[in-house]
Image (cartoon, rainbow, N blue to C red):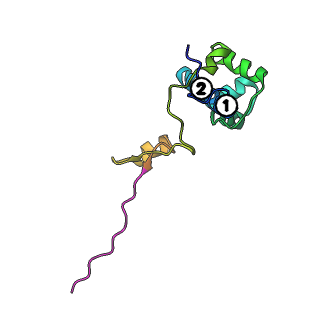
Amino acid sequence: MQVTNNGAMNNPDKTIENIGRRVAEIRLKLGLTQDALAEKAGVTGGYIRQIEGGRKNMRINTLCKIADILECQTRDLFEMPTMKKPTSGRPRLKPYRGKVSMAMAAENPGAYQVEVPKKTKPKRKK
């Protein structure tokens, strides 16, 4: 178990950030969404997003409850995170470059971001 703070020993802001990243790592390994974790913990999805983003200093009670839900020891949340620091903002859909029928799009709305070709001006004859 590695419990170092990357040279930022006893830096509370860095510790809060690392705990949040560990919560995200373990949650993703278990296949839980932020909202599912929030529901089980009795908090809001926004609160979990703030924790995972390193912007929320949670109470010990909440830390222990989240550790129980994530099926780990509380001390496991203090280990150094292994995943990269997440980027901010919502994930974006990748453009779908194949052909999508209206039936496919209707079955699964929001799953496809169809790239519409840009309109080009017709070339003028000289």
Relative to 8, residue 69 above or below: above
Residue 108 x, y percent position in the rendering? 49, 40
Q: Which mark is residue 5?
A: 2
Of the residues shown, which amino acid type is indicated by label 1? Asn
Report the magenta stretch's main SS: loop
Q: CA distance from mark 2 to mark 1?
A: 8 Å
Q: Secondary structure at mark 2?
A: loop
Q: Secondary structure at mark 1?
A: loop
Q: Nearer the viewer, residue 1 or 110?
A: 1
Q: Quadrant of the C terminus?
A: bottom left
Residue 38 x, y percent position in the rendering? 70, 28
Residue 3 x, y percent position in the rendering? 59, 18
Q: Nearer the viewer, residue 114 or 100?
A: 114
Q: Quadrant of residue 116?
A: bottom left
Determine the residue located farthest toward the bottom in the rendered image: 126
Q: Nearer the viewer, residue 77 or 68?
A: 77
Q: Which mark is residue 39?
A: none
Point out the stretch of residues depicted in magenta. 114-126
Quick check: is 60 in the magenta stretch?
A: no
Q: Quadrant of residue 5?
A: top right
The reply to whether discs 2 and 1 touch (Cβ–Cβ < 8 Å) is yes
Of the residues shown, which amino acid type is indicated by label 2? Asn
Q: Nearer the viewer, residue 17 or 126?
A: 17
Q: Which mark is residue 11?
A: 1
- Residue at the image point whose x is 65% and y is 28% from the top: 15
Left or right of 117? Residue 86 is right
- Residue at the image point whose x is 63% and y is 14% from the top: 72
Quick check: is 119 in the magenta stretch?
A: yes
Residue 44 x, y percent position in the rendering? 73, 34
Q: Quadrant of the N terminus?
A: top right
Q: N-terminal of the two: label 2 or label 1?
A: 2
- Label 1 environment density (alpha carbons within 10 Å; few <14, some 14–19, many ≥20): few
